[in-house]
Amino acid sequence: MSTPAGAPPPAPRTGRGPLLSATGLSASLLGVPLVLVPLAVYLLYVVRFGVNVPWQDEWNFVPLLHMALTGHLTLAALWAQHNENRLLFPNLILLGMAGLTHYNVKDEMLASAGLLMVSFGGLGLLYRRHRLGPSWGLVPVAFLVFSLSQNAITLTGFALTWYLVVLGLVVALVALEGLGTHWWALPLAAVGATLASYSALQGLLVWPAMLPYLLRAGTTWVQRAVWTGLAAAAWALYFAGLNLSAQHAGGGHLHFLLHQPLTALRYFVVLVGAVIPSTSAAHGDGQTILFGLLILGLAAVTLGWTVVTRRVQVDRAVSFPLALILFGLLFDLFTTVGRASFGVAEATASRYTIYNLDLLAGIYLVLLHWVRREGRRATATAGAVLIGVVATLLVCQVGLSLRYGWLAGVATHSTRLEAADLVVNFDHAPSALIHTYVYAFPSFLPPQVRVLRQYRLSVFATPAARAYAREGLVPGGRLGPSLPTPPTLQALLRGSARARQAWRMLSTVYQTRPDLRAAYPQGSAGFAAHLLGWATTAGVTTDIDHVFLDPYRGALTRLRAAAG
């Protein structure tokens, strides 16, 4: 049948029957609530395990807060480096929040969750704009963005700096979609990149990560030159006067890579693979290396496909996922240069996973677009196989992150409660416990604690502070209930306060060690005897365990004898 003159061409046949159409509609409707699941879990995680007490880097913010409270705040103080970072925008935001919340660190964690929600919303807009896949195809991205594998920064208020970098990255991605059609696209993208740059060192990587947009057909040489010039200015301003020999800054430098290239390469692979938590300490390193090699291989294939087929130039849909991949890889390279000398084990730190989650999301989105774009071509089969590999990695990532993230949340919550007790009772707290639970340099803390106490900030603004002060330091008593008392120990525990304290301390260690809970599950035969055997032999190896258990060695030995 011919088409009448002037009539629109017939719509292409999709091959869908009524049943498939209904199934597709149902899947699309199902995608909306499924996207909300990881967000709900993330918020529940913060509410359940977050504790309002400064920890580690958060104490460095207290002098700045004191300046603001006493009217002595200066631009130089806001601009001053922290380790290797310029924290201009986080400082401004955290100061504003502190004035409203009495420096409630838990509110900062919730604010970070809000930034993450806005960032995910931006990725969702880009996904729908380019129709990379069905609406339910965004669900894996949601599980990655709100993954509990980033638990170390999820439960740290200071980590708002990292989430501002993510927000700046997404603002730049969304803005550059209008490059060539809207005059404001480039300036708005520069605002996003600047926000990221002066929130943390890794924010500077937003500028080169936008390379896929600059290579796109239609982007003029003037636009490329302007972006390059702005990037050079941002980098130059950042490093002007920066002291890279300051403590913790630049930890390893290029000379380590030249002298230990294999160790650095191993660090890099582990850093990438650690986005999927290892299943056990016994074979965690090998598993993490395998995951790292798989992710790097997939990244190489996706980048190669877009370059060889010239899709990076002509296919606007791949620009933002390619930028996510590029940003993640650049972060891993920079982190390897700066941290590889600290040891490969340091690459598995949870705080590093946030940008590798973006890397994994970018790989998934490019492959999803690959399959959708290629249709029935032979190359679509290769794409389907690769996306099957990615799907397997995503299932592993989500499942393991939920398990180990939740266990880490229990341990973090316990140790932060202990930190709150130590801060409130700081004048009587042992320096060893302060070093372990509150801040690595206890001598820095006395004036900072006085500021919090004087202005009733953070933990001192909560009702819990009065209970902590009234009860004083409770050895191991802030970390949840004591383990149930076995019948064989009841008589000894009733008759000896020292034995009760020792059992309480061992309960604390048990609650903060997921590996102990797995090795000696409660209710198992000989549970108490086995746990006490671990505590009184060579099983105690970590500094934190020694701090808790060494003063009670004699009492633990008597308990072990009583347990048989």
Image (tube, rainbow, N blue to C red):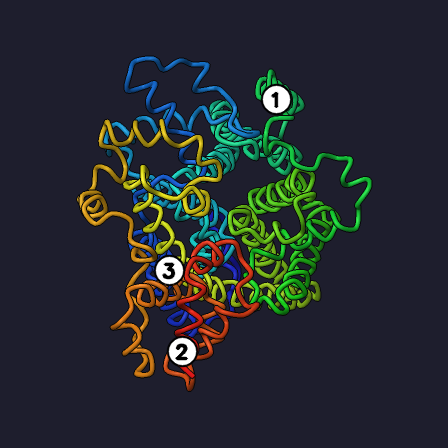
Of residues 7 and 538, the one nearer the viewer is 538
Q: Which residue is label 1 attached to?
A: 243
Q: What residue type is labelled 2?
A: Ala
Quarter-of-image position of residue 103: top left
Residue occupying the point 63% across, 51% down: 271
Q: Which residue is label 3 attached to?
A: 410
Split into 4 quadrants, where in the image is the C terminus?
Answer: bottom left
Between discs 3 and 1, the one toward the N terminus: 1
Q: Which amino acid does label 3 sit on?
A: Val
Q: Residue furthest right?
A: 259
Q: How crowded is mark 3: few (under 14 residues within 10 Å), some or many (20 or more)?
A: many
Q: Which residue is label 2 attached to?
A: 528
Q: In this view, does 357 lie above or below 484?
A: above
Looking at the rendered structure, the secondary structure element under dot 1 is: loop
- Residue 317 drawn at (x, y percent): 56, 46
Quarter-of-image position of residue 456: top left
The disc at residue 153 is none
Of residues 404 and 314, the one nearer the viewer is 404
- Residue 132 drawn at (x, y percent): 52, 53
- Residue 351 drawn at (x, y percent): 51, 47
Quarter-of-image position of residue 411: bottom left
Of residues 412 and 404, the one nearer the viewer is 412
Mark in the foreground, 2 or 3: 2
Q: Residues within 10 Å of mark 2 (few under 14, many from 20)?
A: many
Residue 37 visible at all:
yes
**Alpha carbons under labels 2 and 3: distance apart:** 22 Å
Q: Is residue 384 above or below residue 44?
A: below
**Alpha carbons under labels 2 and 1: distance apart:** 53 Å
Residue 121 visible at all:
no
Looking at the rendered structure, the secondary structure element under dot 3 is: helix
Q: Do the residues labelled 2 and 3 touch (CB within 8 Å)?
A: no
Looking at the rendered structure, the secondary structure element under dot 2 is: helix
